[in-house]
Amino acid sequence: MSEQVGRLSDALLGRYIVEREIGVGGAARVYSAWDVKHDRHVALKVLRPELGASVTAERFSREVRLLGQLRHPNILTLIDSGEADQNLFYVMPYVEGESLRDVMNKGPAPIGDAVRLLRDVVDALAYAHRKGIVHRDVKPENVLVDHRHAMVTDFGIARAVGGDPDGGRRLTMAGRTLGSSNYMAPEQVAGSPDADARADLYAFGVVAYELVAGKLPYGAKNPAAMLAAHLNDAPIPLAQARPDVPPPLAKLVMRCLEKNPGSRWKSTDELLHAFEALAAPETPDAPRKPGRRISPVAIAMGVFFVVAVAFGVWGVRAQRELAADRWAHTVAAPRIRHLLSVDSIYAAWRLTQEVETQQPNQDAITEFWPQVAAPVNLFSEPMGARASVRGPADTEWVDLGATPLQGARFPRAVVRLRFEKLGFATLDTLVDYRTMPTTFRLESGGGR
């Protein structure tokens, strides 16, 4: 046991057993530790002394407690903080797996894998940005990959160490710049006091580019040159760096790398919607069949008939649609927002689904889809099984449709998933959308 690990263990006696150092970053040293009270493996991060000296323990702990309120499947939650051996520390769950940097070290990622991981990162950023929290240090080392899914870590530590209490915008402290030169937005490099969530979008764009292309968007050879490149140089087009990249993905990433924050995506939610579109299945246009020519008189008579009928039913239909629209905006949307605020994801998904059933593409619920649903593909062997879900404590099933299902809006929660097909036994299983398989095998022998 090293001397530093020994001192930490003594300072944290009764709380954590510090095992060994497992990593060193720009802001902290990372240790594997055991949480004595909760009997669990954790990652304990100790701030570098020059950073810890610039902020009081009370202020740091207050900020970390605020960040600990983030609850999202793609965010590694902060669970504790404090001071030990005259050093500030914070604690997160220990995650088996590798960092996105480890993934990148293997070379350019397959497009499908890259889209899946990047979507997870955007989902996490969008959630935090809606809560008013900006990461400020998005980079591959701060993204962990566990069971094929990405989790963003060190969320808001830049604010906890270097942000001002009111706006959290000051990005330097004790002569140091918080953030990596490879991923800093131009406005951060320039020291702008107005750097906001769009700086995270730029950093994400660099990460996405590097994951897909296997290299950074600028050819700078040292940190100083890289900072200058962020300010002045045009990034190498992603399609040039990797010719087989799908044009929509290339366009999405390059928009993140715009020098002017106003030219990037308007919000992280907008970027998340773009990723959802990448995952949505394409529906080819049906070929047109030749038909016989219809005379202008017949067309006129048909139009007259349609207009007459329309006037007869317009009043009733308009009233119904108006009532449904009012319910969606004044009742359903506030209720969904409340359910999300208390982490009732499945209940929020179910209500969002109900609105969609009554009024497809209702704008009142557009903002909620990325928070309540993930696009998944569901297959069964044999195909044609009816799929439905319900919450573990619910009794009512919600129909998803018959397999194969592609890009289905699946609840971002642990749910019961059921498949039913005539002649086969009903399959009813508990699943997590992040780890469940895409194909389910049905056993023969059900009712005929």
Image (cartoon, rainbow, N blue to C red):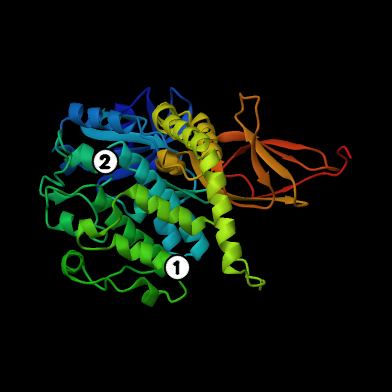
Q: Image quadrant for the N terminus?
A: top left
Q: Quadrant of the C terminus?
A: top right
Looking at this view, is 218 or 174 the one in front?
218
Residue 209 in view, yes or no: no
- Amino acid, disc 1: Pro
Q: Nearer the viewer, residue 182 or 364?
A: 364
In the displayed structure, 427 sits above or below 250; it is above
Side of 62 where 215 appears, left or right: right
The front one of 372 and 11 is 372
Classify 84 as above or below 241. Answer: above
Residue under numbered circle 1 = 108
**Cβ–Cβ under 8 Å for marks 2 and 1:** no
Residue at 56%, 68% in the rendered image: 296
Residue 224 position by quadrant:
bottom left
Query: Which residue is pictured at 83% across the width and 42% down the height?
Result: 422
Q: Which mark is residue 157?
A: 2
- Horizontal placement of 152 versus 399: left or right? left
Residue at image location 28% in from the left, 34% down from the top: 89
